[in-house]
Amino acid sequence: MSKTSKVFFLGGFLFLLFLAAEKIYVLISYNGDIKEESKVNIDLNNRAFKYGDAVFESIKYAYGKLVFWEDHYFRLMSSMRILRMEIPLSFSPEYLEEKILETINANDLEQSACRLRFTVFRKGTGLYLPETNQVDFVISVEKLNSEKYILNSEGLQIDLFKDHYKQVGLLSNLKTANSLIYVLAAIYKQENKLDDCILINDQKEVVEAVSSNVFMVKENVIYTPPLSSGCLKGIMRKNVIKLAKNKGIELKEEAFSPFELQRAEEVFLTNSVSGIKWVSNYRKKKYTKNVASSLIDSLNLFVKLS
């Protein structure tokens, strides 16, 4: 065998070893049945595809449990009721948790940290008026690198997204498949070489970031937009509010303008999978990360012990 042939053979052998080591997780739960993702056929008349007629939860799995599962479950049930979806009698917290854990186990990820997406969409076809309010559901899973929430070492660079305003109302608090404003904001941040950007409502109030709730620290008080400003009713938002109050930090759910970001000492973002991310710069304004560092330590302790 020539030297060149040996190099190609060795390269091919190492590539096969890599494929064996890096298992690709493609098993999902479709209405409670474990299936290969590639073999699940979604009809083009599916209402989630045609109309965004769906809600979903992004859930972290760590330390062998679903983090903040009860909060996620009750938010999902509330969202389904608001959207007039028929909640199956089987949809108890125990049943849905069992189906999520089955999906994790099917992908051999029970010893790992994972991101779960639990999507519920209305069955049937129809035009804007659905044929039925019954639902289907899909559970998918993605491996994460760490069970702990890790504060980013380099702060985020952010700016405002002003091309479109987020509308205020009951639907604005829900986590639905109607996500165009987030898609456009994400494209905007990429085009402008930002790590994230802030959405505002038609009253020019700060609402949230692309996939996170927003917190601001000013004169030893934490501020976060109220639900009435149109922000997502975030699970991590809810629990960070609890943690801050338990630590004796004054926290106010209060509307504020982007101008107030210029006067803040600290800004951080929260979501269920990433935890807390600190912002280092909003335009020319620079921030510290003292409160974010303290809160993420408390968050990790709470999650591990709960």
Image: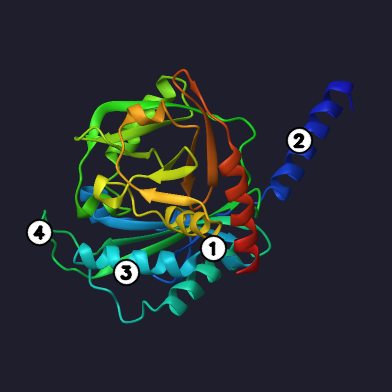
Q: Residue drawn 14% across and 61% down?
A: 130
Return the disc, 3 or 1, that comes first in the chain's sequence.
1
Which residue position is annotated with label 3? 77
Q: Is residue 128 left or right of residue 145?
A: left
x then y, percent, for residue 97: 48, 72
**Crowding near pointer 2: few (<14 within 10 Å), some, many (20+)?**
few
User: Colour scheme used in the picture?
Assistant: rainbow
x then y, percent, for residue 190: 43, 25
Q: Is residue 103 left or right of residue 136?
A: right
Judge depth for marks 4 and 2 and give the one in front.
Answer: 4
Which residue position is annotated with label 4? 129
What is the three-letter code of the residue carrying label 3? Met
Q: Nearer the viewer, residue 245 or 20?
A: 245
Which residue position is annotated with label 1? 67
Return the disc, 4 or 2, that comes first in the chain's sequence.
2
**Crowding near pointer 4: few (<14 within 10 Å), some, many (20+)?**
few
C-alpha gap between disc 3 and disc 1? 17 Å
The residue positioned farthest toward the bottom in the image shown:
89
Q: What element does badge 1 sit on? A: loop
Viewer can see residue 44? no
What is the three-letter code of the residue carrying label 1? Val
C-alpha gap between disc 1 and disc 4? 36 Å
Judge depth for marks 3 and 4 and give the one in front.
Answer: 3
Q: What element does badge 3 sit on? A: helix
What is the three-letter code of the residue carrying label 4? Leu
Return the disc, 1 or 2, that comes first in the chain's sequence.
2
Q: Residue drawn 19% across and 50% down?
A: 169
Q: Which mark is residue 178?
A: none
